[in-house]
Every structure is written in C-alpha cells, then in structure tokens.
Image: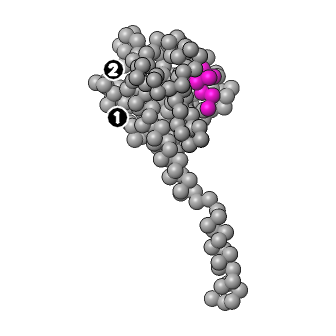
Amino acid sequence: MNKSAKKLLPLLLGVGLLLPQPSVTLAQSLEEQTVLAALALNIVRFTTWPTEAQANIKKTIDFCVVGDNVVQQSFASIDHKAVGDKALQVINLSRLRNFEQCHVLYVSELKQNVLLQVFVEIAKQPLLTIGENADFAVQGGMVGLVNQDGKLTMQVNLPVVRASNLNISARLLKLAQIIGN
C-alpha cells in the first residue's frame, strides 16, 4: 500500500463509521415493529366482539395489516397465534379496500386524509382499529400506540370503540390514556 493510501485509510474508516448502517437500522425497526405486533396481539386478546360479529368469526380472527415490508414481516411473528379458542390469521393488505374481510385493522403509516377516509368507510363496524400514528386515536382510530420519549403509550378512543359495539377489557383500559371520554 502506498503512502497516500495509508494516510487516507483512517479517514475513510472514520467516514464509514459515521454513515448509517442500513442493516442495523432495519434490525432496530424490525425489533420495534415486532414489539408492536405482540402488543397488538394482546389488545385483540382483551377485546370482545358483539354477538352478531362473533357469528362471522369462524375459526380465525382475521388481522389485516397496512404497512411497509418491515411492518408486514414483523406481524408474521403473531400469525396463527391463539386468541381464546380461535387463531389469528394475519392478512397483508396492499390496497385499502375489502375491509369486510377484517376483524382487526392495523395501520402503520397513512397520510392523514387517507386515514380519515378509511375511518369514514368503516365507521360503526365491529372492526378493531389499531395504529401507530401519534394522532391515530384522536382522529378516529380505536387504539393508538404512541412512542413518547422512548416510552410506548396506548391511547384508546372509547366513543369510537363503543359506537362499533366492541368491548375492550377494563384491565387493558387501566393501562391506556382514554381519548374522548
């Protein structure tokens, strides 16, 4: 190795250490999303659907996911998990339609105007909505999972939950910040 290359090597190594490492960022994001998936599974376990909706829930609770590949990959970890006497079936939605096939709708990131359209379309249906947006529950979602200063907070919009005839256990509600009560 010549002298000029030896002088540049420490500089290049230093610059390389300062650049973001995509695999580390992806791993952290996948880990965070996997935690959110596990939390969403437990929210489903503490939710009861009205009698008429339960008739449509045969052997699986269809858990629809809207999000990028990392989100969809992380929710694969809860696919086929037990929820009472049923199994959770994760369905990755590539388009925002056919919500009637879903018992749960998990939304990772949507533009506000699109999210509001979804809420209008599914209003008063027994469809549990869970999302990551900081204003998800305030805008009309049922359960918002918000990362505030590295701490995960759960917000529940009780009027929307009640309008859909869903029931979220009081044990879970004790852990949540109630919106619109």
Residue at position x 40%, y 41% in the image: 77
Residue found farthest to the left: 85
Instruction: Locate the C terminus and report the quarter of the image it occupies.
Output: top right
Question: Which of pointers 1 and 2 lies earlier in the amino acid sequence?
Answer: 2
Q: Is residue 25 above or below residue 126?
A: below
Residue at position x 58%, y 20% in the image: 179
Relative to residue 34, is residue 109 drawn left or right? Answer: right
Depth check: 106 or 45 in front? 45
What percent of the width, then of the height, locates residue 12?
Answer: 66, 74
Q: According to the image, label 1 marks what residue?
A: 80
Depth check: 4 or 67 in front? 4
Q: Amino acid at mark 1?
A: His
Depth check: 9 or 94 in front? 9
Q: Residues within 10 Å of mark 1 (few under 14, many from 20)?
A: some
Residue 58 has which mark? 2
Q: Amino acid at mark 2?
A: Lys
> Which region of the structure is painted magenta?
134-140
User: Is residue 125 among the parts visible in the rendering?
Assistant: no
Q: CA distance from mark 1 to mark 2?
A: 14 Å
